[in-house]
């Protein structure tokens, strides 16, 4: 259920009944020639919608800008600082708590937001320990990704506009994928990229980290459904704890 389409006269009772607010968080950044700049927003939104149906939650308007320092010099990328992102998430969480929500679940579509989301969750915990805050980024995806992947990962953590993320898009937002433009670009990511600030233009011209031509809807569905099941369990466990408190 979309929170922004509610009205002030009726929403209070619905908040009491639902208890859970889901915030999709994405980014605007380069995703190769075959995916749109808003790929991370689309993934976060579509996944949040599926999650909300299963846990009877409100979906908040998407937070569409993220920390994209690594790709900020690519055409189309829009970067915000971790500090800005943290402040905004904390302010949103505070408002949700004051409105009566018990669970605040952030569904992240962009790995670069992870640090800010975790820090914001910690700040909210210190301020409002009764508000349960989750920061979710495809939980449990590692095993199904290993099962469906046809090419080695370019990096132990990153996946971007590649076989994996393009498969997610083919499942969740296929109308925005131009597979006829998909490319294979497997960069050699230097070891120092993990231990010192390294703009991605130092090792890629395309922002594609793998073989996007191997992406399929079926691969995306297999991984997304595992992540979705895990998110549902995490939220339902919190709701059960709240109901018994």
Image (cartoon, rainbow, N blue to C red):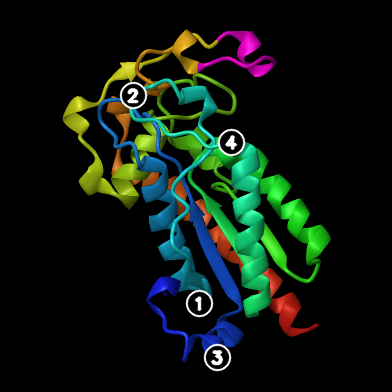
Magenta stretch: residue 134 in it?
Answer: no
| Residue appearing at x 60%, y 43% in the figure | 84
Kindly state the secondary structure of the residue where label 4 is placed.
loop
**Residue bearing mark 4:** 81
Q: Earlier in the sequence, mark 3 or mark 1?
A: 3
Numbered circle sitting on residue 71: none
Residue 210 percent location from the top left of the image? 40, 21
Residue 211 percent location from the top left of the image? 35, 22
Q: Are marks 1 and 4 in contact (CB under 8 Å)?
A: no
CA gap between label 3 and label 4 equals: 36 Å
**Residue bearing mark 2:** 75
Give the quarter of the image for residue 207: top left
In the picture, measured across the screen, residue 5 lies left or right of residue 134, that is: left
Disc nearest the viewer among 1 and 4: 4
**Residue bearing mark 1:** 56
Magenta stretch: residue 193 in it?
Answer: yes
Decide whether the magenta segment is chiefly helix, strand or loop: loop
């Amino acid at each position: 259920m979309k929170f922004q389409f509610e009205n002030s006269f009726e929403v209070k009772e619905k908040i009491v009944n639902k208890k859970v607010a889901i915030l999709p968080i994405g980014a605007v950044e380069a995703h190769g020639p075959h995916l749109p700049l808003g790929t991370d927003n689309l993934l976060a939104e579509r996944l949040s919608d599926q999650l909300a149906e299963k846990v009877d939650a409100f979906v908040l308007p998407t937070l569409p800008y993220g920390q994209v320092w690594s790709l900020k010099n690519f055409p189309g990328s829009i970067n915000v600082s971790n500090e800005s992102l943290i402040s905004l998430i904390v302010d949103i969480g505070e408002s949700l708590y004051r409105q009566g929500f018990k669970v605040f679940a952030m569904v992240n579509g962009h790995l670069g937001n992870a640090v800010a989301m975790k820090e914001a969750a910690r700040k909210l915990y210190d301020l409002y320990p009764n508000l349960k805050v989750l920061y979710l980024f495809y939980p449990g995806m590692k095993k199904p990704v290993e099962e469906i992947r046809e090419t080695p990962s370019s990096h132990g953590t990153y996946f971007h506009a590649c076989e994996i993320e393009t498969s997610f898009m083919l499942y969740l937002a296929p109308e925005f994928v131009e597979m006829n433009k998909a490319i294979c670009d497997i960069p050699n990511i230097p070891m120092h990229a993990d231990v010192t600030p390294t703009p991605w233009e130092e090792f890629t011209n395309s922002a594609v980290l793998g073989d996007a031509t191997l992406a399929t809807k079926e691969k995306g569905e297999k991984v997304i459904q595992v992540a979705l099941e895990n998110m549902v369990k995490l939220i339902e466990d919190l709701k059960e704890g709240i109901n018994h408190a």
